[in-house]
Image: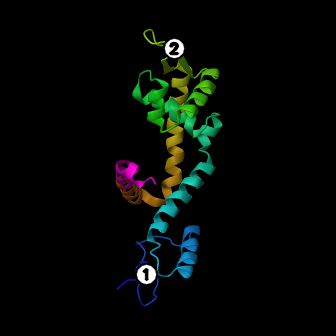
Amino acid sequence: MTATNGRPVDGAARPTAPGAARHDTVAAVVGQWQAVHPDLDTGPMEIIGRINRCAALLQQAEDAPLRRAGLSRPEFDLLGALRRTGHELTPSELTRETFSSGAAVTKRLKLLTERGLVERRGDTRDRRVAHVRLTDAGRDLVDAILPEQLAYETTVLAGLGTPGQGELASLLGELLVQLEGRLGMLRV
């Protein structure tokens, strides 16, 4: 039998998944909250706290191959969107493709244009619309960095092993679909 906080009633340690390490910084925070509020279920904190902590650490690492190329992750995502779609996109389409704000995309496009990695051209029918495409230099840069970036990401995830990576990708995919479907309902 378990209490509402997910811990067994007899006070024994909370069961963990096979091979799961619970000696991370989030475990310490969760333990502190359990001591302060033993009646609350801290299970969601263990998941969301770890997702947030992993995201923060990955962002701090700054993606070494991208950094060497003088790119940020958001800049690479913009270049990658143009490369993977294979055609020109408007700034509004790039906003949707990269999950960025319009202002952020505008700022990145300015920098990438100055570097000669993208080109903008006006729409012949509507002068308010711009179309953005990769230059040859931009395409070559994406094609050169992508294998190196994927190798870097493989190294980052290597400690999980192939089955663990597949399981994590599947679980995160399920969570993402749920969150994307309920995004409007989750906002207060």
At label 2, which amino acid type do we have?
Arg
**Does residue 71 appear to the left or right of 77 in the view shown?**
right
**Does residue 156 appear to the left or right of 161 in the view shown?**
right
Task: Check the image and report above or below for 31 versus 147.
Answer: below
At label 1, which amino acid type do we have?
Arg
Q: Around disc 1, counting alpha carbons within 10 Å, would you say few (fewer than 14), some (14 to 19), or many (20 or more)?
A: some
Cα separation between marks 1 and 2: 60 Å
The picture quadrant where one finds residue 84 is top left
Q: Main secondary structure of the magenta part?
A: helix
Residue 182 pos. (x, y %): 36, 51
Please tell me the numbered disc located at residue 121: 2
- Closer to us: 72 or 91: 91
Quadrant showing the N terminus: bottom left
Task: Check the image and report above or below for 173 versus 87.
Answer: below
Q: Please tell me which residue is depicted at 39% across the width and 49% down the height of the picture.
A: 184
Residue 117 pos. (x, y %): 57, 23
Which element is circle 1 on? loop
Q: Around disc 2, counting alpha carbons within 10 Å, would you say few (fewer than 14), some (14 to 19), or many (20 or more)?
A: few
